[in-house]
Image (cartoon, rainbow, N blue to C red):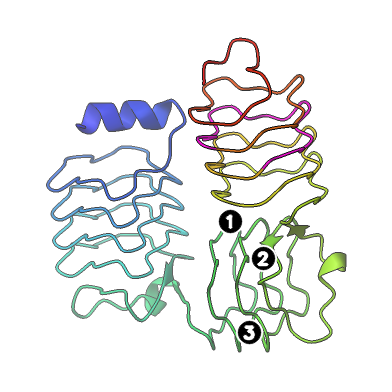
């Protein structure tokens, strides 16, 4: 893959580029907002003057990268290695980092208004929409008034966290999520991800549901465009009118599922178990 192919795939709607090698690439001035480059080799990459709001760089190697003037607001920098990177004029406000994140010598992320993520994090009134907190530990975090709209809280330990006035509308949780005693998640407007769940008309764009059990779930008219549903159990699910454009359904169990009027353009159904192949789709 070269830079033109990467930008072309991004323009077509692809956002996940896991463990890619972009070492010494020149992408100055490009728009890669909300793309995921988890654990990518990005040593000495030129990302100067880029628009990369919300970019996922968890575990990425950015040693020696040119990030001058890049707009990295709300980026996820947890466990990223940014040593020797040039971050002059880089906007990392609302970005996330943790104790494993390595910054250039003398660089102060707090002074740049980034959020430190740890079990006792001070995140009152923080903007945390769409953040992936799966299997995280926020056991004593102050999340009062935090905006957690569409955040992924599956498996997250929030026991002991302060959630007063926090906005959890459309956040995702499951039976492994731990909330503080007395917290009524049913009143928070969050989505339970489980067999038989009612997710009709839910906004689930680009969610990571690989291997998830959503058998018998009601997903009628849900927006699952570009979602990762690989190996998901969707047996008997109601997907009538759902938007599955670009969704990864490789190896998914769709037996007994209703796919009438579903949008399946660019969906990947290789290896999926189907009662019959929808018109125009080649698994």
Residue that appears at 59% across and 10% down: 280
CA distance separating discs 1 and 3: 18 Å
Q: For the residue carrying disc 3, how many other residues have a C-alpha within 10 Å: few (<14), some (14-19), or many (20+)?
A: many
Q: Where is residue 277 in the image (x, y as percent from the top left)?
A: 63, 17
Depth check: give the residue in front, 75 or 265: 265
Q: For the residue carrying disc 1, how many other residues have a C-alpha within 10 Å: few (<14), some (14-19), or many (20+)?
A: some
Residue 277, relative to residue 21: is it above or below? above
Residue designated by label 3: 142
Magenta-tinted stretch: 234-251
Query: Circles 1 and 3: CB distance less than 8 Å?
Result: no
Does residue 234 appear left or right of residue 197 in this picture? left
Question: Dominant secondary structure of the magenta stretch?
Answer: loop
| Residue 16, quarter of picture | top left
Mark 1 and mark 2 lie on one chain; the one further toward the N terminus is: 1
Q: Where is residue 153 in the image (x, y as percent from the top left)?
A: 63, 66
Mark 3 and mark 2 lie on one chain; the one further toward the N terminus is: 3
Q: What element carries label 2?
A: loop
Q: Is mark 1 on a helix, strand or loop?
A: loop
Residue 205, relative to residue 5: is it above or below? below
Depth check: give the residue in front, 147 or 220: 220
Quarter that holds the N terminus = top left
Residue designated by label 2: 147
Depth check: give the residue in front, 245 or 278: 278
**Quick one: which residue is furthest to the right in this view?**
187
Does residue 213 appear left or right of residue 70 in this picture? right
Query: Circles 3 and 2: CB distance less than 8 Å?
Result: no
Residue designated by label 1: 130
Mark 1 and mark 3 lie on one chain; the one further toward the N terminus is: 1
């Amino acid at each position: 893959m070269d830079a033109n192919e990467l930008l072309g795939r991004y323009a077509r709607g692809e956002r996940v580029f896991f463990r890619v090698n972009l070492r010494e690439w020149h992408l100055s001035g490009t728009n890669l907002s909300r793309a995921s480059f988890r654990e990518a080799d990005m040593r000495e990459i030129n990302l100067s003057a880029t628009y990369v709001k919300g970019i996922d760089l968890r575990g990425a190697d950015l040693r020696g990268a040119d990030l001058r003037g890049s707009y990295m607001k709300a980026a996820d920098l947890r466990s990223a290695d940014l040593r020797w990177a040039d971050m002059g004029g880089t906007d990392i406000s609302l970005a996330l980092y943790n104790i494993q994140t390595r910054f250039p010598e003398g660089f102060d992320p707090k002074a740049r208004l980034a959020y430190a993520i740890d079990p006792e994090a001070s995140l009152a009134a923080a903007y945390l929409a769409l953040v992936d907190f799966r299997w995280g530990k926020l056991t004593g975090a102050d999340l009062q008034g935090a905006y957690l709209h569409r955040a992924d809280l599956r498996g997250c330990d929030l026991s002991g966290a302060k959630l007063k006035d926090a906005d959890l509308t459309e956040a995702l949780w499951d039976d492994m999520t731990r909330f503080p005693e007395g917290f009524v998640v049913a009143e928070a407007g969050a989505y339970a991800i489980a067999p038989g769940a009612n997710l009709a008309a839910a906004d689930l764009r680009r969610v990571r549901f690989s291997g998830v059990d959503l058998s018998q779930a009601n997903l009628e008219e849900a927006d699952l465009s570009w979602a990762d549903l690989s190996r998901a159990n969707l047996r008997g699910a109601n997907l009538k009118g759902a938007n599955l454009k670009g969704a990864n359904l490789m190896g998914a169990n769709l037996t007994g599922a209703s796919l009438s009027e579903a949008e399946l353009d660019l969906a990947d159904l290789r290896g999926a178990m189907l009662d019959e192949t929808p018109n125009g789709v080649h698994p």
